C-alpha cells in the first residue's frame, strides 16, 4: 500500500462479540460473527468493497482468522494493523490465576514454550535482572512471532499498535521511557509503531514534551460526529489533530459504536485533517 | 460529615489555590495500577508511595517509578506524611490494612476498593475508626459513577415512574463460564457476591435506601469453598419487593454486567452499564445510551467511571469533606451479603 493511500480498515470488535453501544446487542447478535471462518469471509467481502486493511487485537480468535485469510489468499491484499496485548484476555486471565503475579507466571510459561529462543533468552535476562526493558522487548518479539506464524511471511504487517489500556496507563504514569523504547524497537524491527489511546490530545501533548517524533508513528483514536469517547472533548481532539505534522491518525469509533448512520459518520470524518485512515 | 480541621487534613499546599493531595496506593494488582495511574493524572493529586508485599512486584515498581517510593508494608507509609491512602488489595486484607492506617495515624482519608471488608463485623469496626479519624472515607463502588445508573437515580428521585413497587437486578460475568468443576483455574477465594454481586446490592441500596433479605440461595458451581451464583429475594419499605440474580458462570458476558428492571406506579426503568430505557404507563418511552449522557472525562482509563470516582474522592478531600459512597453506606452492602449467606444456610 502506498504511503499516501488512505487506510480503510475492518475492525475486529464484532468478531470478539464486542459492542460499545450495548453489550446486550452483541449478545443478541449471536455467535456467528465470532466464528473465525465467517469473520474471514466478512473481511473478504469488505476487501471487494474497498477495504484494504484489517485492524485486530492479537488473540487466538484473530490469529485463526488470519489463518483462514492466508489459506484463501486474501492476506496478500491486506495491510495488517495488530493491537497488542489483547488486554481483555489478560485482565480476565488475571482474575482466574491469582492476579498480576499469577498472570505474569502464565505469560512467561507461554513465551517459554513458544519456541522463540531469542525471546526466551531476552526474557530470562529480564527476569533475572528485573530489567523491564528486556521483558517488554521479549513480549513484543513473542507477539510479533505469533502474528507472523499465523499470517505467513508474505503478509504485510504495517503497524503494531500498543493497546489502549497499556498506552493510557503508561500515559497516566508519565512513563516516557516505555514509549521511547517501544518506538525505537518497532522502528528497528521495520514496523510502524502505533498507539491506541482514549486520551488523544494528552498523548500528542506528552509526545511533544518528550520529543518523541509524531512523524514516525500512527495513533488510533476515537473520532466521530458526536464526540463519543473523545477525551477531554471533541473540540480539543479536533484542535490537536489539526496541529499534527502529517496524516498519521487512524480514526476509530467513527460510527460511535453504531450510534451514527454510516453516511453522517463518513461526512464528518471526511472534514478532518491528518486522518491516515479509518477503522470500522 | 464535619469539615476537616487542621489535624485531620494535612494538605500539601503551597498556596490556597494550589492544593495537592499526597496519596499512597496499597496493593499493586490490576486495580492498584489503574487507580495509581488515574491519580497520577489528576493535577491535584500527588502519588507519593506504592506498597505491595510481593518482592518481585516491588522490584519492578522501583525500576518503573524513580520518583515514587515503593515499600513492602503499610506501617512504612507513616514516613510520607500522607493525606490519603487507597487500599486495592484482596478483600480479606482491607480490614487489617485500614485498621493499621487509622490506628497508626498514617493518613486520615481512606479509599477502599469494594467491598469495604470481608464481613459486616469488620465493616462496622472500620466505620467507627473512620468516624474517629474525622477524614473522608469512600468505597470504590464505581457503578454509581456510570452515567446510565446516575440517570436512573435522578429519574427515580424525580419520581419519573411514580413510587417504586418492585425491581429485578442481575450481575453476570463469564469469568468462570465453561470451566470444569474442581479446576484450579476456576477456584477463587472470594465468592461472587463480594466479587460482583456487591455492585448490584450497592445500587439497589442507592436506589431504595433500605433492603431486607427474605430468601436466598447460593451455590458453588466450579469453586470449592465459595459461591459462584446467588439468587435473592428482598423486601423494602412500602411493600417494595426485589429479586437479585448473580452468577459468574453465564455465557456471553465477556465483561461483567449489572442491570436493573425497576417497576413503578407510573412506568418502568430498565438500566444497565450501557443504556437506560424508561417506559411510562401513558405510552411514552425514552431511551438513553452513554452517548446521550455526556459520558466524557478529563482522563480515560478503563472506563470513565473510574476517573469520576477518583476525582470525586480527591475533590471531596480537598473541598467538601465528604464522599459517596462512604463507609457507613458501604457497610450496609456487607451486612446484606452476610444476611444473604445466613438465609441461604
Image: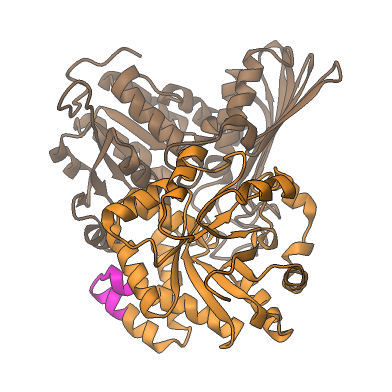
Chain colours: A orange, B brown
Residue B94 vertical position relative to residue A96 in the rendered view, above or below: above
Whether residue B267 sits left or right of residue B116 in the image: it is: right
The image quadrant of residue A187 is bottom left
Looking at the figure, which quarter contains the C terminus of chain B? top right
Q: Position of residue B269 (x, y in %)?
A: 73, 26
Q: Is residue B116 visible?
A: no
Q: Position of residue A185 (x, y in %)?
A: 35, 75
The region drawn magenta spans A124-135
Whether residue B313 sits left or right of residue A126 in the image: it is: right
The image quadrant of residue A111 is bottom left
SS majority, magenta: helix
Total number of numbered discs in the rendering: 0
Residue pictured at 33% horizontal, 55% vertical: A207
Residue pictured at 35% horizontal, 47% vertical: B37
Q: Residue furthest right?
A: B283
Residue B294 vertical position relative to residue B48 in the rendered view, above or below: above
Q: Position of residue B337 (x, y in %)?
A: 55, 33
The image quadrant of residue B208 is top right
Residue B247 on the magenta segment: no
Which one is nearer the viewer's eye here, A7 or A166?
Answer: A7
Residue A16 vertical position relative to residue B159 in the rendered view, above or below: below
Q: Is residue B103 visible?
A: yes
Residue A129 on the magenta segment: yes
Amino acid at each position: 500500500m502506498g504511503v499516501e493511500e488512505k487506510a480503510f480498515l475492518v475492525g475486529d470488535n464484532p468478531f470478539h462479540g464486542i459492542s460499545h453501544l450495548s453489550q446486550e446487542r452483541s449478545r443478541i447478535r449471536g455467535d456467528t460473527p465470532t466464528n473465525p471462518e465467517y469473520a474471514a469471509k466478512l473481511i473478504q467481502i469488505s476487501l471487494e468493497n474497498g477495504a484494504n486493511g484489517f485492524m485486530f487485537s492479537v488473540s487466538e480468535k484473530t490469529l485463526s482468522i488470519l489463518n483462514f485469510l492466508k489459506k484463501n489468499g486474501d492476506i496478500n491484499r491486506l495491510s495488517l494493523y495488530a493491537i497488542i496485548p489483547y488486554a481483555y484476555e489478560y485482565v480476565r486471565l488475571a482474575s482466574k490465576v491469582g492476579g498480576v503475579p499469577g498472570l505474569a507466571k502464565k505469560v512467561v510459561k507461554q513465551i517459554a514454550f513458544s519456541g522463540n529462543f531469542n525471546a526466551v533468552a531476552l526474557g530470562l535476562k529480564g527476569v533475572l535482572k528485573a530489567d523491564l526493558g528486556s521483558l517488554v522487548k521479549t513480549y513484543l518479539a513473542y507477539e510479533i512471532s505469533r502474528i507472523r506464524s499465523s499470517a505467513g511471511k508474505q503478509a504485510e504487517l504495517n503497524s503494531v499498535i500498543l493497546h489502549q489500556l497499556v498506552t493510557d496507563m503508561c500515559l497516566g504514569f508519565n512513563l516516557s521511557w516505555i514509549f521511547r523504547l517501544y518506538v525505537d524497537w518497532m522502528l528497528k524491527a521495520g514496523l510502524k509503531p502505533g498507539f491506541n489511546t482514549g486520551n488523544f490530545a494528552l498523548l500528542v501533548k506528552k509526545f511533544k514534551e518528550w520529543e518523541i517524533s509524531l512523524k514516525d508513528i500512527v495513533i488510533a483514536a476515537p473520532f466521530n460526529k458526536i464526540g463519543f469517547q473523545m477525551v477531554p472533548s471533541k473540540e480539543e481532539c479536533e484542535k490537536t489533530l489539526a496541529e499534527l505534522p502529517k496524516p498519521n491518525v487512524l480514526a476509530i469509533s467513527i460510527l460511535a459504536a453504531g450510534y451514527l448512520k454510516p453516511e453522517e459518520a463518513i461526512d464528518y470524518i471526511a472534514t478532518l485533517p491528518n486522518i491516515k485512515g479509518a477503522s470500522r | 460529615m464535619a469539615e476537616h480541621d487542621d489535624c485531620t487534613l494535612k494538605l500539601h499546599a503551597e498556596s490556597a489555590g494550589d492544593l495537592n493531595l499526597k496519596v499512597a496506593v496499597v496493593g499493586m494488582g490490576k486495580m492498584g495500577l489503574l487507580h495509581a495511574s488515574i491519580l497520577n493524572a489528576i493535577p491535584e493529586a500527588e502519588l507519593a508511595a506504592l506498597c505491595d508485599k510481593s518482592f518481585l512486584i516491588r522490584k519492578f515498581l522501583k525500576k518503573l517509578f524513580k520518583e515514587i517510593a515503593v515499600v513492602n508494608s503499610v506501617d512504612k507509609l507513616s514516613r510520607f506524611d500522607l493525606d490519603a491512602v487507597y487500599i486495592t488489595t484482596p478483600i480479606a486484607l482491607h480490614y487489617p490494612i485500614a485498621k493499621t492506617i487509622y490506628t497508626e495515624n498514617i493518613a486520615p482519608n481512606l479509599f477502599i476498593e469494594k467491598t469495604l471488608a470481608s464481613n459486616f463485623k469488620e465493616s462496622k469496626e472500620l466505620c467507627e475508626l473512620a468516624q474517629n479519624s474525622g477524614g473522608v472515607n469512600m468505597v470504590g463502588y464505581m457503578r454509581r459513577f456510570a452515567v446510565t445508573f446516575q440517570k436512573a437515580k435522578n429519574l427515580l428521585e424525580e419520581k419519573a415512574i411514580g413510587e417504586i413497587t418492585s425491581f429485578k437486578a442481575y450481575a453476570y460475568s463469564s469469568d468462570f463460564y465453561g470451566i470444569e468443576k474442581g479446576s484450579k483455574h476456576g477456584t477463587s477465594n472470594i465468592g461472587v457476591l463480594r466479587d460482583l454481586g456487591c455492585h448490584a446490592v450497592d445500587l439497589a441500596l442507592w436506589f431504595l435506601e433500605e433492603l431486607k433479605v427474605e430468601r436466598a440461595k447460593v451455590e458453588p458451581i466450579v469453586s470449592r469453598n465459595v459461591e459462584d451464583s446467588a439468587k435473592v429475594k428482598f423486601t423494602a419499605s412500602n411493600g417494595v419487593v426485589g429479586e437479585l440474580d448473580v452468577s459468574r458462570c453465564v455465557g456471553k458476558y465477556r465483561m461483567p454486567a449489572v442491570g436493573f428492571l425497576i417497576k413503578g406506579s407510573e412506568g418502568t426503568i430498565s438500566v444497565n452499564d450501557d443504556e437506560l430505557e424508561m417506559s411510562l404507563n401513558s405510552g411514552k418511552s425514552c431511551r438513553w445510551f452513554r452517548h446521550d449522557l455526556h459520558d466524557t472525562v478529563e482522563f480515560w482509563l478503563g472506563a470513565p467511571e473510574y476517573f469520576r470516582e477518583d476525582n470525586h474522592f480527591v475533590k471531596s478531600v480537598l473541598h467538601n469533606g465528604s464522599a459517596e459512597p462512604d463507609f457507613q453506606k458501604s457497610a450496609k452492602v456487607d451486612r446484606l451479603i452476610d444476611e444473604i449467606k445466613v438465609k441461604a444456610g
